[in-house]
Image: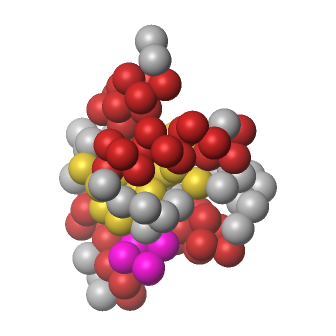
Amino acid sequence: MELKEKIIHDIKENKIILFMKGTKETPMCGFSNSVVQILSHYGVDYKDVNVLTDPQIRVNLSEYSEWPTIPQLFVEGELVGGADITMELHQEGKLLDILDTSKS
């Protein structure tokens, strides 16, 4: 399986997936850390993918999502957005509804 196919497969097979710099245990940038903290606040289970392990992950991911920045949060195969959008949805009380759609 090529890298782009693996990325698409991971997005479709995981209800919530976060492509980030670092891991959920050790985020390597403030934006990734912000999203990790928000997801931890809601206590949701999610897969994390460290884009720093291979520069091509970021390239292929951005081609697929048409979103240039990291982190990228996907729920049920749909791009929610990066750190700013995730924070905004959290502050507006809308993120929980999005995350709840993944519980089935």
Colour mode? secondary structure
Can residue 84 be found in the magenta stretch? Answer: yes
Number of numbered discs present? 0
On the image, the x and y values in percent for residue 61 come to 43, 44
Q: Residue at x 77, y 55 (%)?
A: 26
Q: Which residues are magenta?
A: 83-87
The picture places residue 75, in percent across and down from the top left corner, at: 31, 50
User: Residue at coordinates 40% horizontally, 73% vertically from top-left?
Assistant: 86
Question: Which residue is at the front of the view, 25 or 69?
Answer: 69
Image point (49%, 45%), residue name? 59
63 vs 103, nearest the viewer:
63
Query: In which image quadrant can residue 36 be found?
Result: bottom right
Residue 34: x %, y % from top left = 59, 73
Farthest residue, direction top: 1
Q: Left or right? Give the position of 103 relative to 6.
A: left
Residue situated in front as seen by the camera: 61 or 35: 61
